Image (cartoon, rainbow, N blue to C red):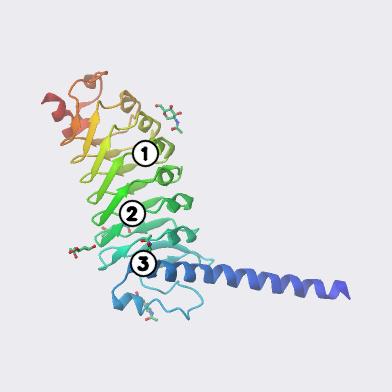
Amino acid sequence: MKLVLWPWFLLFFALVTSSWSLSSDVQALLALSRNLTLPSSISSNWSASDATPCTWYGVTCNGMNRVIILDLSSSGVSGSLGPEICRLKYLQTLNLSYNNISGNIPASMGNLKRLSWLSLYINSLSGTIPEELFKNQFLEQVYLHSNQLSGSIPFSVGEMTSLKSLWLHENMLSGVLPASIGNCTKLGGALSLNNQLSGSLPETLSKIKGLRIFDASYNSFTRRNHFQFRKLQVGKFLRGIQLYKG
Ligand SMILES: *[C@@H]1O[C@H](CO)[C@@H](O)[C@H](O)[C@H]1NC(C)=O
Ligand SMILES: *[C@@H]1O[C@H](CO)[C@@H](O)[C@H](O)[C@H]1NC(C)=O
Ligand SMILES: *[C@@H]1O[C@H](CO)[C@@H](O)[C@H](O)[C@H]1NC(C)=O
Ligand SMILES: *[C@@H]1O[C@H](CO)[C@@H](O)[C@H](O)[C@H]1NC(C)=O
Ligand SMILES: *[C@@H]1O[C@H](CO)[C@@H](O)[C@H](O)[C@H]1NC(C)=O
């Protein structure tokens, strides 16, 4: 008798767990939409009765109906980004750019271990960049520019070993550019212009061989460096070098 029941039990178990995980992304997005103010055209589209969110505006799923892309860029979204974002465990791309989202970047985003593309630029985000956010070896593109972010650039920036682009310009960031940035050896572009960064540029920048675009102008960096910019190709430092010509 037991032998006959086992397969049914397993099937039941499989169905329950898969439907639970399917709807967990529905639950996560609906939870997010409580703090994120969506225009009615989107909130009416995000229907709570759907088994998956895969046909919802801005949502792209993988073959297992899990959300991998959330793109609400230029969609008239305001309000704040809640910590529930971390419940979209399979998220690879988050694009909320060109909106008017305020509040902080939730530290829980550090749990989005598959996230490789993060676009939060042109919003009204404030507060500090959470240290946890940068503890991610899969993040390749990080665009946080044109917000009102303050505080310092987390030292954990050095843990983003896949990082190719880091755009932090037009914020209110202060403190130093952490030396750990030298660990981001795949970095091709780093923009930090128009902040309140100070100190000297870290020597470790010279370790990043593929750095093509670097602009740290309109900050409070000291002109004197402890390393020779001349050793680097001028092209690599673009407008950044103009700062040092003064
Ligand atoms: C939601 O919008 C998408 C297009 O973005 C559309 O394909 C889908 O049918 C819409 N769903 C509902 C319930 O309106
Ligand atoms: C994010 O949105 C902007 C503006 O709509 C667009 O230019 C960009 O390609 C988008 N990025 C991704 C990864 O979808
Ligand atoms: C979400 O909204 C609730 C109620 O308005 C508020 O208490 C909470 O602080 C908000 N959360 C975030 C992260 O803004
Ligand atoms: C953005 O939202 C803030 C409130 O959080 C509001 O004061 C401001 O006018 C909004 N800006 C735009 C361009 O809608
Ligand atoms: C990155 O670089 C700094 C100094 O340049 C070093 O102390 C640190 O251990 C490195 N590793 C990480 C993961 O940041």
Query: What residue sits 76% from the left and 73% below the top?
Result: 9
In the rendered image, which residue does mark 1 sit on?
A: 154
> Which dot marks residue 199?
none
Q: Earlier in the sequence, mark 2 or mark 1?
A: 2
Q: Is residue 229 above or below residue 32?
A: above
Query: What residue sits 17% from the left and 23% below the top?
Result: 223
Q: What is the CA distance from the residue labelled 3 to the residue labelled 2?
A: 12 Å
Q: Where, quadrant-wise, is the C terminus in this rendering?
A: top left
Q: Position of residue 139 (x, y in %)?
A: 41, 46
* Disc 1 crowd, CA 10 A, few/some/many (<14, 14-19, 20+): many
> Which dot marks residue 35?
3
Disc 3 residue: CB within 8 Å of ligand 3: yes
Residue 244 position by quadrant: top left
Q: Position of residue 185 (x, y in %)?
A: 38, 33
In the rendered image, which residue does mark 2 sit on?
A: 104
Name the residue type under label 3: Asn
Name the residue type under label 1: Pro
Residue 169 position by quadrant: top left
Disc 2 residue: CB within 8 Å of ligand 3: yes
Q: Earlier in the sequence, mark 3 or mark 2?
A: 3
Q: Position of residue 78 (x, y in %)?
A: 27, 65
